[in-house]
Image: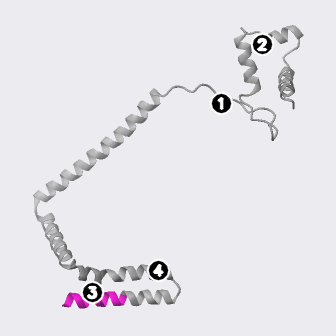
Amino acid sequence: MLTAAVSVALTAAGVAVAGLRAYRRRFLSATRWFAVALLPLGLYLTGLFPVARTIGDELADWATKLVLDPRVWTGIVLLGVSAGLLATTRWVGRRGAAAVGSESRPAAAGPAPARPAVAPAAGTPAAGPAPKRAEEAAGAERGGAGKAGKQGKAGKSDSGLDEFADIEEILRRRGL
């Protein structure tokens, strides 16, 4: 009977606080207070107060044994060792996976291609690799007769102007 009175009183007090919160236009807070206020009466009506009392008694007994019983301390040590072993194996597993993953991973295909010197127009498709790299690859496939052959034929010095000529040729091919 006393449990019922206390439950109803706690619920009524919580609903009153929720009403004050709602009056002050703090509706989120009012809803939280109302939800918490319903718990005591709900626990009483479902009969869970005796269960809570039993749980409280058991926790008190365990706490008493914790202080006085060496068997409980042995159990706590075993739980700590278990948690430590699980944490250590997880850490070592991650560390080992990272080391193995970095060794078995293939090397990069090379440096990233450079951006083209001229931005493409709005209607043209984006260019692939940089023009300079495409010309170098073509020269390497022909046995080195790329730029070196052009310089030998024209007799130009390496002033960097031949790169602009390559760019102009590519732009002409694209119609820009």
* Residue positioned 16% across, 55% down in the render: 75
Indicate whether 71 appears above or below 92: below
Q: Secondary structure at mark 2?
A: loop
Q: Amino acid at mark 4?
A: Ser
Image quadrant of residue 109? top right
Q: Work out whether 51 lies above or below 68.
A: below
Side of 9 relative to 23 (left or right): left
Kindly report the distance in space between the C-alpha atoms of the residues bearing marks 2 and 4.
77 Å
Q: CA distance from mark 1 to mark 2?
A: 22 Å
- Find disc 4 in the rendering and name its residue: 29
The stretch in magenta equals: 1-13
> Which is nearer the N-term, disc 1 or disc 2?
1
The residue depicted at 80 percent of the width and 32 percent of the height is 117
Q: Position of residue 126 (x, y in %)?
A: 74, 35
Residue type at numbered disc 1:
Ala
The N terminus sits in image quarter = bottom left
Quarter of the picture holding the C terminus: top right
